[in-house]
Each structure stands twice: as structure tokens, then as C-alpha cells.
Image (cartoon, coloured by chain):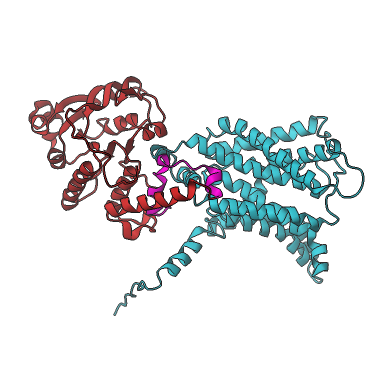
């Protein structure tokens, strides 16, 4: 067991990060807003942690103190939140695919900025980011609770006034407005919450990956996170979490399969390197056969309804004679 | 504010005042004049009918009143205050609720959720109080749910509170939409063709239902309707729109005899 965890520590923690990044896309989607801005805030959070841990916090030997990491996460959260409000107010005037395009542009702007600024280390990026844990599995101490808390947060959110306002806007923005819900406010709020989560994940990731550069937070990442949500299911928070876990595990599984002796070389090669092709095919298959994603709310609703009313007689089957 | 079903302190209404005043409202869509210089006022506690042939501008006028479409010119006063150009959620918060001609329920949500959503302006818990279950959120949630159930009961849908709105029969969807509008505790209720697609019996019971909520919630009702007998029996006063212009205004018997109305509208039947 210990050997398993130490061998797959990196993968397990990566899966949890992916689940949270899926959630960060799901939050604006709760209010019906298709935003692909998460990688931008993820990159921002990472740079904040990288810069602070390498040049602000004094640190010479031993493990980097965990409280510093937490402080970096808080600062990343605040910075992402503020930036999200500034970007969100104009961007969320756009709808559907136009919002998606604008958020992709936002991610690109941040990427180009980070390539050209001195503080972000230009194209080389920032490396030698200090480690708070002895092993990569140690990051579970941060990633695990953070994922659980964010899942709990979204679970509660779906059941309260603010979450209902989000869902109302997703269902019908005009009707929601006519019921006294301010669409702009709640759209920006949902967008900002997604940004805060992505920023916090970025801050931990910078330590986890040891190095941070402009390759973190690109258009590819936008599409990958979108795949988490689309494959997992966009109508309940379990969907993006499962999508993130499964789609991060998948390439490693494929690699494992590729290592099985006796496979034709071309197949082994494809399984190793064709990750994005396989993702693309999965999204296409998902869109056609599981438009709701792997997980949809009806699964839970039916079970709940059955449990609530076990005595309701089933509709008798009509027999044709 | 505690009881939805009992009207707030009903002092006998000694004098009627105008709840909604439409002053010289016009709206153009490109070259088309959808509403042309329309003025009327709706008195407190009145059931006011807005009729007219297809394309007369009735729904456009509703959209202007509820802020969905800004008017090209003219002013709107609600209880004497200017509401022209306010955004829809602000107008809803002032106590003007509506239903839609082409039913706009939140189809994927349950009937209960539909009505609970419309309690938005009467609750105020935010994201942190809500997520962490701090006061006032828990008490508010309980109250929101019980009010929503009361309203579902009122429209006769309480036993199907958990059913998705899109799975309801057409007439039930209309009643659910009215329940949702009532959840705003409006003083002015706008009904856009509430009887559309109903048969004569359903229209009769709808008419009685509108009367009963009008009494129970001390509402002022402004309704668009095609079905002339229903309007004649239900409304205190009627305005007739024809090609965006107001061609008649008055009590039903009076309007029914108006030659312009007969020519424009009733004559078609």
C-alpha cells in the first residue's frame, strides 16, 4: 500500500487538482456562463505563490513552512477574485460562445504578459519553488481538504438562495430577472468564485510542480478543463469532479496498457502519445451519446424519489391482447 | 410579512389611486411602430384588461412595463414613482410580477424550486450565511419552502411539488407560473394571455381563480386576453390596442359598443 501511494503520489494529487479545476469551470456554468478563464486564474495563483515563495518569504533550509503556502493561497484567492470582478463585469455582458471566446482571449493575454514580464521570469519561468512536504504525496494534506471543502461548498450552494439564483439564470435569464434576481450580480459572483478556486489551486500547484512558467494556463488547459465538465456532466458538481479524476487518470492507465508486452508497436505508441486524440474522441462520443455527461442529477433524483415514496404503486403495465 | 395567504392589514379602500400610469409610451422596432403613444392608468385593486388583435402591441407593452424592453419614448409611473428604464429585477422588486405568454418556467427544476426562486427579493441571506448555515439563512430557507408550498397548494399543485416543471400539463404550467409570480408578493400582477390554449371550462375556472387571488392578495391585475367573453366578465375596465394605438378605454359594456373596437376587433369574430 505504501509503495503504491509513493509510486502514484504525483498522479493522485494531480487528479485532485484536476477535480478542483473542473469545479472552477462548473461554478460559472451553474449560472449558465461558459467561461474558459480558469487556466488564467490558475496561472496567476501559481505565479503569486512562485514569486512569494522564492523572493518574499525568507527560507533557507528544511521544508518550506506550510502556513506560508496557506498565506500564498489566500493572497492568490484575493488577487484572482479582484481580477475576476474587473474582467467579469464587462466580459459577462457577452453570452454563450462569445463569452467563451472572450475568456480564451483573457487567458492568452495573461500568458503573453507572463512571457514578457521580468517578475514572472519571462519564457524560462520561475523554478526551484521550495517544497513544503518531503514527498509529493504530502500535498494530499492540502489538496484533499481543499477538494472536500470546495465540494461541500458547491453542494451547499446548490441548495441555498444564492445557488437558486444561479440556477434560475442558467435556466432562463429573462424569467429570473423578472423574478427579481439581478443577473449581472450573480453572473459576476459565480465567475468570481470559480476564479478564486482556480487561483488557490494554482498556488498549491506551483509548489507541487516545483517550477512555474507560461506553459501553465494555456488554451489547451482551457479545453482540458472543459472536457472534465462535459465528460463528467455539467448539471451536478459530482460531474466535473469525476471528470477531472477520470480524465487525469486515463492517460496513465493508457500508458500502463501500452506497456503490456505483445501489443503491436503502433498501438502502444498511440496509447502513449495520442492522449489528446483520445480526449477529443471521448468528448465527441460523450456529446452524442451522453449529452448530459456521465453523471446527471436524474440519477440522484430517481433514487431519492424511490426512497421517499416506497408505497406509491407502480403504473400497471398495459398488456395488449 | 409572515403570512402569504392573508393580505397585509386591509384598510377599506376609500379612494382609488392609480397604481400604474402609462404616459405617452411608444416603441419602435426599426421602422415598425409596435406601440404608438399609448397612455392609460391602472387603478388600485382593479382588474384591467388589455385586448386587441394579434400584433397589436400588447406583449410589447407588457415587456416595456416590466423593463424587458426599454420604451423609445414616454414614461411609466408606479405608485407615483418613475420606473422608466429600470432593469427588470428592480421593477420586480417594486412589486410588479408577471407571467409570460409563452410560459417561461424553469423547466428542468421542480415546481417547488420554481416558486422558491421567486422568493428571492423577500430573503436576503448571502453566500456565506447560506453555505455555512448561519442566521438568517436556516430560518429563511424553512420559511421560503413553506411559503412556496402554500402557494403550490393554492394553485392545486402541492401534491406534485417535486415534479419537474416541464413535465406538467399545459394548464398546470400556467397555474405554476401564476404561483411563481405570486411568490413575489406583488401589488401589481401582469398576466400575459393566461387562458391561451385552454378550453371553455378551463377558462371559466381560471376566471374564478383570478378573481379569488385578486381578493385574497389585494392585487391589482393587468391582463392580456384574446378571449372576449372572459375579458368582458372579468375586467373592471378594458383598454383596446390596435396596431400599437389605444383605440378605446373604459368599462366592458362601453368598450363592447365602441364602433372603432367593433371594426378593429370584435367585428372579426
Residue placed most toward the observer, B233 or A122: B233
Q: Residue B55: x, y in percent?
A: 26, 32
Q: Residue at x 55, y 60 (%)?
A: A295
Q: Residue at x 19, y 28 (%)?
A: B16
On the rendered structure, is A160 left or right of A320?
A: right
Colour of chain B as rendered: red
Residue placed most toward the observer, A7 or A218: A7
Instruction: Check the picture and name the quadrant holding the C terminus of chain A.
Output: bottom left
Rendering quarter of residue B264:
top left
Colour of chain A as rendered: cyan
The residue at the far bottom in this view is A321
- Verify whether residue A298 appears in magenta: no
> Would you place residue A139 above or below residue B90 in this image?
below
Q: Which residues are magenta?
A: B107-132
Q: Residue A308: x, y in percent?
A: 42, 67
Q: Residue A138: x, y in percent?
A: 80, 57
- Verify whether residue B124 appears in magenta: yes
The residue at the far right in this view is A61
Rendering quarter of residue B33:
top left
Q: Residue at x 57, y 51 (%)?
A: A154
Q: Residue B110: x, y in percent?
A: 40, 54
Residue placed most toward the observer, B172 or B58: B172
On the rendered structure, is A55 left or right of B144?
A: right
Rendering quarter of residue A113:
top right
Q: Residue at x 31, y 43 (%)?
A: B182
Q: How many tags in the picture?
A: 0
Amino acid at each position: 500500500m505504501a509503495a503504491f501511494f509513493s509510486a502514484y503520489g504525483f498522479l493522485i494529487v494531480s487528479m485532485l487538482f484536476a477535480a478542483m479545476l473542473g469545479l472552477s469551470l462548473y461554478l460559472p456554468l451553474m449560472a449558465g456562463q461558459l467561461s474558459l478563464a480558469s487556466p488564467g486564474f490558475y496561472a496567476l495563483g501559481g505565479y503569486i505563490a512562485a514569486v512569494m515563495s522564492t523572493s518574499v518569504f525568507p527560507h533557507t533550509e528544511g521544508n518550506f513552512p506550510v502556513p506560508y503556502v496557506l498565506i500564498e493561497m489566500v493572497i492568490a484567492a484575493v488577487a484572482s477574485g479582484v481580477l475576476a470582478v474587473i474582467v467579469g463585469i464587462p466580459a459577462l455582458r457577452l453570452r454563450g460562445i462569445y463569452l467563451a471566446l472572450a475568456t480564451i482571449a483573457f487567458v492568452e493575454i495573461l500568458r503573453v504578459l507572463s512571457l514578457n514580464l521580468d517578475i514572472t521570469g519571462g519564457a524560462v519561468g520561475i523554478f526551484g519553488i521550495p517544497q513544503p512536504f518531503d514527498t509529493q504525496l504530502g500535498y494530499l494534506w492540502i489538496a484533499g481538504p481543499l477538494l472536500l471543502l470546495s465540494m461541500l461548498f458547491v453542494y451547499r450552494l446548490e441548495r441555498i438562495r444564492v445557488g437558486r439564483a444561479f440556477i434560475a439564470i442558467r435556466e432562463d435569464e429573462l424569467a429570473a430577472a423578472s423574478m427579481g434576481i439581478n443577473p449581472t450580480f450573480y453572473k459576476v459572483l459565480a465567475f468570481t468564485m470559480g476564479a478564486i478556486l482556480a487561483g488557490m489551486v494554482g498556488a498549491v500547484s506551483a509548489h507541487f510542480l516545483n517550477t512555474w512558467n507560461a506553459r501553465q494556463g494555456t488554451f489547451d488547459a482551457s479545453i482540458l478543463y472543459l472536457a472534465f465538465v462535459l465528460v463528467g456532466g455539467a448539471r451536478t458538481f459530482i460531474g466535473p469532479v469525476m471528470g477531472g479524476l477520470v480524465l487525469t487518470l486515463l492517460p496513465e492507465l493508457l500508458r500502463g496498457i501500452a506497456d503490456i508486452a505483445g501489443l503491436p508497436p503502433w498501438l502502444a505508441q498511440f496509447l502513449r502519445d495520442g492522449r489528446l486524440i483520445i480526449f477529443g474522441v471521448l468528448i465527441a462520443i460523450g456529446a452524442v451519446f451522453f449529452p448530459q455527461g456521465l453523471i446527471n442529477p436524474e440519477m440522484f433524483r430517481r433514487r431519492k424519489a424511490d426512497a421517499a415514496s416506497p408505497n406509491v404503486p407502480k403504473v400497471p403495465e398495459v398488456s395488449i391482447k | 410579512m409572515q403570512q402569504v395567504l392573508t393580505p397585509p392589514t386591509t384598510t377599506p379602500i376609500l379612494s382609488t389611486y392609480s397604481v400604474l400610469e402609462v404616459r405617452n409610451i411608444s416603441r419602435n422596432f426599426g421602422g415598425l411602430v409596435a406601440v404608438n403613444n399609448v397612455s392609460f392608468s391602472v387603478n388600485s385593486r382593479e382588474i384591467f384588461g388589455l385586448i386587441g388583435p394579434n400584433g397589436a402591441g400588447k406583449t410589447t407593452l407588457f415587456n416595456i412595463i416590466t423593463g424587458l424592453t426599454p420604451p423609445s419614448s414616454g414614461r411609466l409611473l408606479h405608485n407615483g414613482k418613475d420606473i422608466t428604464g429600470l432593469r427588470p429585477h428592480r421593477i420586480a422588486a417594486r412589486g410588479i410580477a408577471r407571467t409570460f405568454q409563452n410560459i417561461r418556467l424553469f423547466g428542468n427544476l421542480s415546481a417547488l424550486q420554481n416558486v422558491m426562486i421567486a422568493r428571492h427579493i423577500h430573503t436576503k441571506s448571502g453566500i456565506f450565511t447560506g453555505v455555512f448555515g448561519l442566521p438568517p439563512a436556516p430560518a429563511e430557507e424553512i420559511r421560503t419552502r413553506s411559503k412556496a408550498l402554500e402557494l403550490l397548494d393554492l394553485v392545486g399543485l402541492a401534491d406534485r411539488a417535486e415534479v419537474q416543471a416541464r413535465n406538467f400539463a399545459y394548464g398546470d404550467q400556467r397555474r405554476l407560473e401564476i404561483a411563481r409570480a405570486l411568490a413575489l408578493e406583488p401589488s401589481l400582477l401582469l398576466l400575459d394571455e393566461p387562458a391561451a390554449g385552454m378550453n371553455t371550462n378551463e377558462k371559466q375556472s381560471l376566471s374564478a381563480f383570478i378573481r379569488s387571488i385578486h381578493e385574497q392578495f389585494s392585487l391589482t391585475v393587468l391582463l392580456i386576453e384574446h378571449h372576449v367573453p372572459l375579458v368582458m366578465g372579468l375586467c373592471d375596465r378594458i383598454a383596446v390596442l390596435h396596431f400599437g394605438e389605444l383605440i378605446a378605454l373604459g368599462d366592458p359594456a362601453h368598450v363592447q359598443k365602441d364602433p372603432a373596437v367593433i371594426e378593429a376587433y370584435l367585428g372579426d369574430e
